[in-house]
Each structure stands twice: as C-alpha cells, then as structure tokens.
Image: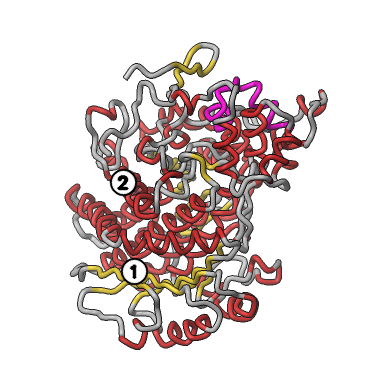
Amino acid sequence: MRQMYKLAGYEASLPITEKSNPITKDLDRADPVQMVQLLRDCDAEIFQEEDDTLVNYKRLYSESVLRTVFDIAKKVQEILKDPEDGLIVLSGCGASGRLAHLLANSFNKLLKGLHRPPHYTYIISGGDRSLVTSQEAPEDSPTLGVAELEKVCEGKKKVVFFGISCGLSAPFVAGQLDYCLNNLDIFVPVMVGFNPVSMARKEAIDGWNSSFFQVAERMQKLQETQSAFVLNPAVGPEGISGSSRMKGGSATKILLETLFLVAHKADSNVEVSEKCLLEILRTYERAHKVTYSQSKKIAALVKQAGTSLQKKGHLYILGWGTLGLMAIMDAVECIPTYGADYRDIRGFINSGYSGLQNKEGDLTSLGPEFAISQDDFVKTVLPSMTETDTVVFNFTLDDDLASVEKLVLLVKEKTSNIQAISHATAGQYLPASTKKLFRAIISITWPILFLEYEGTFIQKFQRELSTKWILNTVSTGAHVLKGKVFRNYMVDFRVSNSKLFVRAVTVLQRLSGQSQARCSDTLLRSIYGTEVLSEEIREAEVAKHVEIASAKEQVVCTALVSLLRNCSVIEASARLETYPTIRAAVEASLNAIGRKRSLINIEMQSVDTEDGPKFTKPTD
C-alpha cells in the first residue's frame, strides 16, 4: 500500500485525481472481501504522511497544509466575530456541491446551539435540484457560477469563499474564484482540491477568457500575502479512476470540518495549537480504522447489493437525519459515474425536504426522482418491490428506533434482503426487538468524547464519514460486480459535461493504445451514431458534443469496443448486446485474435513529450 503512485512514470501526463491507482488495478477481478480491502487501502492514503515516494507533493499532515488551514481559520474567525456584514460561502459541483450544502448546514446548526445567527451558506451548480438528482451540465458555466455568487453575497462587506473542485477543473468554480480575485476588497477566496496547481485543468473554457490553471496560478501567487489561499494536499488516485466522489469527497469533508472546528474553537477564546488541529485530524483517521474493522460485514453487503443489481433489482438506502443525506448523495453519484438509472440505487431521508434543509424547499413536484422522504418510499416504491431488491437501514441509536422497526416490518413483506448500518456510542446497545429484524447489521460503536460543545459535533461528523465510506464501497463494489468497471476504470459513465468528455478520451487512449486524435474521433462517432464525421461536427465546441452525449447511453464503451475491434460504432454497439456485461465485452475485445495489443495488455506507461503523452514500456 505504501507504494502509492510512481510520480516519474505512472501515467505521468494525467493529474493525480485522474490517474489509475495501482492498488486497485485488478479491482474487477476481486471478490467482495478483496474489494473492501482494496478500497480500504485506497481510503487510507488520505492519511498517508510524506515519504520518499511523494517528492514535491503536499499531504494532509504536511506542515505547509496545516499552516494553511490555520491561516484560513483565522479569516473564518473574523467573519464569526462580525457576522452581520460577513458571510462564509462554500461552493461546488456535483458531490462537492452536496458536501458544501451538508457542511454549511452543519455549522449553522452548531451556531444555532450557541444562540447565534447563521454565518454559512452554500452554492451548488444546477441549484437545489442537484442535491437530489444528477445535473452535470451546469458545471461547465463560469458565468452561471459568478451569477450565483453575486446573488448570495449581495450587501455583504466581507466574504470568505471556498471554491471546491477536487480535480481543480470545474469551470463553474473557476469563474467564481476569478470573480473573487477581481474583488479582493470583499472576498478572501480559498481554492480546495487535490491536485498540485501545475495539474489544474489547462484547456480553454468555452465562452470564457481563462482556464482553471490560470486562475489557480493567480491564487498561488496571492497566497504569499494571504489575499487568497490554495488548500490542495495530494490524497492519491481514486479507487475507481477519476471517481472523486470517493477520496476527494472524503478529504473535502475532513479538511473543511477540521478547519471550521478550529475557527470555532478560536472564536470561543480557546487557545488553538497545532496539537489541537492534529487531534481533530487523528479522530478522522481513527474513524477509518473503526469503520473498516467491519470489513467482512461490509463485504457481505457488497455481495448482496451486487446480486440485486445483477438480477435487475434495486438497492434502497433508508436513512435517519444526516445519515439519510449521505444515502441520497451516494445514490445520486452513481448516475454519472456508472451510467446508472436513478431507480437502480436510491436514498431516502426520514424527514424529507425539511431534513434536507435546502434553500428552495420541497422539490417533489418536479418528478418521481425528486421524491426523497421515507413516506415517498412507502407510497411509491414499496408497492412494486420484489425479493430481488435489497434495503439498507441507516441510523444511530439516538434515532427513533420505533419508526425504524415499523418500516422494517413493512419492507419484510416484500423482501428478506434487509440489512442495517447502526451507529452507537460506547455504553449503548441495540434493543433485541430491533436487532432480530435484520438479516445482518454493520454495528459501529464510537468512543465517548469528553469535549466542549463544538467537539460534540466531531462524533456526528465521524458517523457521517463512516457511513459515506461504507456506502461508497457498497455502491462501487455492486457496480463492479454488475460489470460496469474494467480493471479500475469506469467504462460506462455518462459524458454529461466537458470534464467527462476529456476523461472519456483519456480512458479510450489508456485502454486502446490508440492516438488521442483517433480516440476523439471514435468518441464523436459513438456520440453522433455515424461513421462519417462532418466538418460541422468536427468544428463544434465540446459543449455541443456534451449536449448530444448526455442524452445517450453506452457512449464510452461503444467507442472502446469500436477501437479495440477496429469496427464501426454500429457493429460495436451490436457486439455489446451479445455479452452479459460491459466488462465481458471489453475483455473479449482486448483478447480478440489478431488485434494490436493495447496499453493494458503490455502494461505500458505514459510520459510527457513536446507532442503530448507518449507510451513506453516500464523499465521496472
């Protein structure tokens, strides 16, 4: 596990967040127990300290990162002291935006307990509908990001702005950070991500005058005067290449919760030292160990969820309080990542939109995918459930266990595949009446924390993160078992924004060994369903390709089979239909007699040259 990723040779042309992680290179061949172990080891990399294999890469525990956290916490503290004219804004796209919403609400709740007004707010690209459904396209608009920022900050004299983009790539966030840089009399911009600035996205943004990289460079220079901040420790490649909902999301939660807790401690006139900061970070590291001590039971849930998806059944996750939010977040993120239907995996929260605490209120009327309450589950999902479905109950022993038991009994009439994730504090025990209702329970007990008021929130944060780790592992493992992953690459993701278009070309290059130009052409042929690309298609902006691709299924895997088989996209699509899974179709194409071996077959590595990435055989 300590091997990490080779900085000199391993996919050198790609940002860290887009690399393939050596730990999980054979994830698609692993059984559920092995999958959990591999993903556990990937998550552990978040806490890996600096060593000789990570030259020039800052880590979570690097002195410079800890110092930056301290410096930003002081800026946040200034807002806490003068909330009337100030505001703390967290913004992001997709998973990052959902975490922005979760964290803003968490710390406003903390303030409410101290009889203080809210100081935090959130922005998510696509608005509140993106909290509960997949809305990828708005991520590509920097002007939309600026408009949303202006709206929430109207009348404020001082704003600390956190722009979260795990890969330093989202145009929506780039536009906001650029706006902040042009208005430093009001804004203190903080860029949060997990690539070095040199790896920020360099492609020009359609309809805009800059790139993310140019914005990141400006911020890095301004950090010397503390006019802007870059918070970007490396946490290693994702377990599924490019799936930043996993480690990127977890590291975002850990970093920002720690930062805000430090700011609140200082605001309470508690002396905050580096030791205090490290103690908070270590609680999250311990949470990793506590969570994965349940690996065998997590693996059993992976197997059960995978069986349901393989049989065209569903996975439903019913949560109480913010654990319901974690369920919704995990389910929604499977749609763009695995080309999943929103019905495949769904999350529900006991109190619906009142528990979501979103700005726009109840969105249920927008369509069936916006129904998120447990009452909605009972009314619209339960009647059509079958034995092929799996249901996971997600609660703490402080929740209303009578309501848990009542709902389990209703579900039992439809399926016996019922499991639970329960969180207890030392000294608490699950009542026998509840325990006997479940086939299996992932039961996690947390130590009692004897801390001041702000510190009591750490346990809430631990439970949320633990739940996130478990659900990420379960939904990832289930889709691996369904054949949606080849090695550790997602090969059936929806090309629904410019970042995913670039990722699609990269994955095609990596798995086929073909040139960037040929991979790009084949992807376009798959998107447009044609063998001949017109000049109009070739000259169109990426945004146009994304608009067409986002409404189509199996775009990437069709292009991949076409490249591997050297056949038309029509034939490739037909071939996909003849195999039980996408993974099986890709593997058969790779092993086809007489075809040129791909990069995967000969384990080649990419290196940068003046003409772009070239691939060479490894020397070790």
Mark 1 nearby-residue class (10 Å; few <14, some 14–19, many ≥20): many
Which element type, helix, strand or loop, lies under badge 2? helix
Q: Position of residue 491 (x, y in %)?
A: 57, 41
Q: Magenta stretch? A: 506-525
164 versus 204 height, above or below:
below
The residue drawn where x is 31% and y is 59% is 295
- Percent position of residue 278, x then y: 21, 50
- Residue of label 2: 41
Amino acid on which the number 1 mark rests in the picture = Ile
From this view, report whether residue 22 is shown above or below residue 79: above
Q: Is residue 517 magenta?
A: yes
- Disc 1 designates what residue? 442
Q: Nearer the viewer, residue 154 or 214?
A: 214
The alpha-carbon separation of the residues under discs 1 and 2 comes to 19 Å
Residue 404 percent coordinates (x, y): 44, 82
Residue at (35%, 75%) from the top-left corner?
A: 396
Decide whether residue 401 is among the magenta residues. no
Query: For the view shown, which residue lies furthest in the top direction?
Result: 610
Locate residue 358 relative to residue 525 in the image: left or right: left
Q: Amino acid at mark 2?
A: Asp
Q: Is residue 469 left or right of residue 213?
A: left
Question: Relative to the observer, which residue lies in front, 154 or 356?
Answer: 356
Quarter assignment of residue 561: top right
